[in-house]
Amino acid sequence: MKRIIKKVAVIGSGIMGSGIASHFANIGVEVLLLDIIPKEPNEAEQKKGLTIENKSVRNRLVNDNLTAALKSSPSPIYHQKFANRITTGNTTDDLEKIKDVDWIIEVVVERLDIKKAVYEQIEKFRKPGTLITSNTSGIPIHFMSEGRSEDFQKHFCGTHFFNPVRYLKLFEIIPGPKTSPEVLSFLNEYGSKFLGKTSVVAKDTPAFIGNRIGIFGIMSLFHLVKEMGLTIEEVDKLTGPVIGRPKSATFRTVDVVGLDTLVHVANGLYENCPEDEAHDLFKLPDFINKMMDNKWLGSKTKQGFYKKVDKDILALDLDTLEYRAQKKASFSTLELTKTIEKPIDRFKVLIKGKDKAGEFYRKSFADLFAYVSNRIPEITDDLYKIDDAMKAGFGWENGPFEIWDAIGIENALELIKEAGQQPADWVQEMLSSGKNSFYTVKDGATYYYDIPSKSYKKIPGQDAFIILNNIRESKKVWGNSDATLIDLGDGIVNLEFHSKMNTIGSGVLQGINKGIELAEKDFQGLVIGNQAANFSVGANLAMIFMMAVEQEYDELNFAIKQFQDTMMRVRYSGIPVVVAPHGMTLGGGCEMSMHADKVVAAAETYIGLVEFGVGVIPGGGGSKEMALRASDTFRKNDVELNVLQEYFLTVGMAKVSTSAYEAYDLGILQPGKDIVVVNKDRQIAEAKKQALLLAEAGYTQPSKRKDVKVLGKQALGMFLVGTDSMQAGKYISEHDRKIANKLAYVMAGGDLSEPTFVTEQYLLDLEREAFLSLCAEKKTLERIQFMLTKGKPLRN
């Protein structure tokens, strides 16, 4: 049966319900969001003479919840206009409207009696065949569908989203006793293809997969921190980015999620998993009980493990339970990993540490490895699902079994033994059969060790993806220390860069030029894309700073010209060039995207020209490109100055989109040309497809532009008056005004006496001259140095 999801009903509008509704709106689905009617009008409503019969009063709860969600940061929605796809109502007046939807998602309070009462009402109006799922995070699925019709049970299961719904990719699907295989298959594919999620089918066990392992990990650390006498700052240092986990690490994450939420799940596991060998770890330590008594729940109560007092953030001392100034955490073991770029390559070093950090890693990983091995087949039959759940639900760069592989299975078994833990028997059986890793790569695909068959099986769903890690070595065409060209097949080659933070320097520029050269000779098209955390944070600032400080202006001029020429080569090559940005795509990364034949952007792309923050203007063609795009936007009878001003402000205010969809508003992505994909895992495959389409349509090299309309003195005068008044009003500094005036000169096309048509090269020369002059400014050098050392912009 073919299913098309045109309209979804979400019952319950709390944080999760509004988040789920917003994410369906993100992907273009019409949403009906319902909640209960408040018991009575509030004080403000009473003053207006409104009664409970008034529609605005009856829908107040749902409307207030949705409004609060849409205003929250980070936002649950890609673009505020997408909220128009959500219609609100209440479960008394509007429940009958669910007869018109394709999928009903229940997100009410976590009480079985309430959920069952809601299902009874839903069944009165639901049309047969409609999907019905629950976002429960812990109530057994088999309890919820008891007593419902056969059709209801056939189309019912759990669909557990993680909060925040937009950003966390895990989508757990938990079948009930009678759930149709067709329903499970559909949801699995829909979650991946349309919702952009990592779909994981889990068993109906307490807390499913993600929270079972995640809460174990946190509770294990709660006990370990006391046992080892560590501070919360030390644990957060050890469990953050250094091992490929989010910056919020452990204790900051608990503060954000809410201690009460964690305690609720931990208590559920303690009560419902009596046979779990780690059962006692789910018992709350005394300091957690005390924090719960004190209502120190984290961000929602303004204090938890951390507390903000004025401008200072204090940390909780777990021994005294008093807040104190934070202490800097430092470990010699971590120093040994500073030169190791990828977290997966650090684990072997970390577990050998001779200090407290090494001891911590040995104990914590031993506990984790033993625990995950023993959860198979209880929570899942497939080890890769545990890794998928932890990466997608908790933001881990590597799952437990991937880390175990990186350390070495036998090495990790020694750690487990030393810690007095017992791994599952199947691990030793696997080793005895001559298989010494949980994963292996073959023919560009990842295979996992399948325990029942005692053989490697291909992880399903990979056919829709291109995983660069799997083909980098076997399909490498060319490479240097900063970039690699990989043959994607079908005549398309991919340029991946892997410099530090994917900054763009001479090695990356060499890679782009080499990629175009080889593609023009031996291929049909070029994709520029990677699968790192971020596409690129921009040009290599350290190199620019060094040249500027040494006053090597000829070399700097040459480097900037090389950057500009490379961007123009992207624009005017003989083959289609598709750029695939994602994550942070700043400065030069943005300029590269703007010069592509087509952009295939991940929905989570934060893109913008941010050069003002380091005291310069975009110098790799970005300033030129904004002037060109303004020119292309001019229409007959337009006030052209106003159009140009919008593009000028985008650069001058260093605007960065909070999603790829917002980049259309900034003029960075172009409607009708550039596209957005929700699932980043599918991005390279989609970029390859688009490059092929362009090639097969008979791609021809574009003609160089000589028709860019610049407004000259007319625009320049307006900009200069504007920057003067901004400085006079103390909105910008004197140096800000100087940078803005340089940008104004470029985007106006200089001080030409009247509007004139010019070439792109004319504008590039103005841009480069302005960039170089700013690099000679002391205040610009201060800004660059501050960014390099502090990682944030300086206002001087």
Image (cartoon, rainbow, N blue to C red):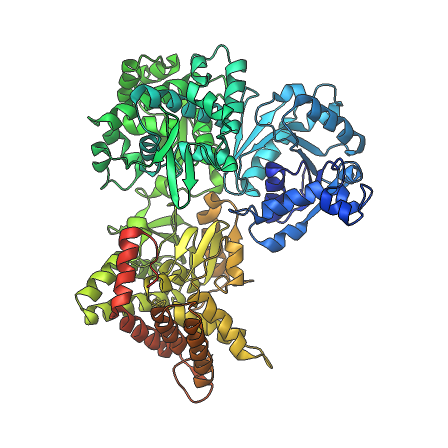
Instruction: Check the picture and name the quadrant holding the C terminus.
Output: bottom left
Residue 463, horizontal then vertical, whole percent: 48, 39
Q: Is residue 93 left or right of residue 276?
A: right
Q: Write the residue at 29% across / 14% down.
A: 417
Above/below status of 301 relative to 207 = below
Residue 534, horizontal then vertical, whole percent: 39, 49
Which quadrant would residue 88 be assigned to in this image? top right
Closest to the observer: 227 or 372?
227
Residue 326, horizontal then vertical, whole percent: 33, 37
Closest to the observer: 142 or 689?
142
Above/below status of 522 relative to 36 = below
Which quadrant would residue 473 be assigned to in this image? top left
Q: Residue furthest bottom?
A: 753
Closest to the observer: 259 or 497?
259
Above/below status of 614 relative to 685 = below
Instruction: Check the picture and name the quadrant holding the N terminus.
Output: top right
Residue 161, horizontal then vertical, whole percent: 56, 34
Q: Is residue 440 visible?
A: yes
Q: Is residue 32 visible?
A: no
Q: Is residue 522 left or right of residue 357?
A: right
What is the total number of numbered labels drawn onto the structure image?
A: 0
Which quadrant would residue 91 be assigned to in this image? top right
Q: Write the residue at 58% across / 49% down.
A: 71
Q: Residue furthest right?
A: 53
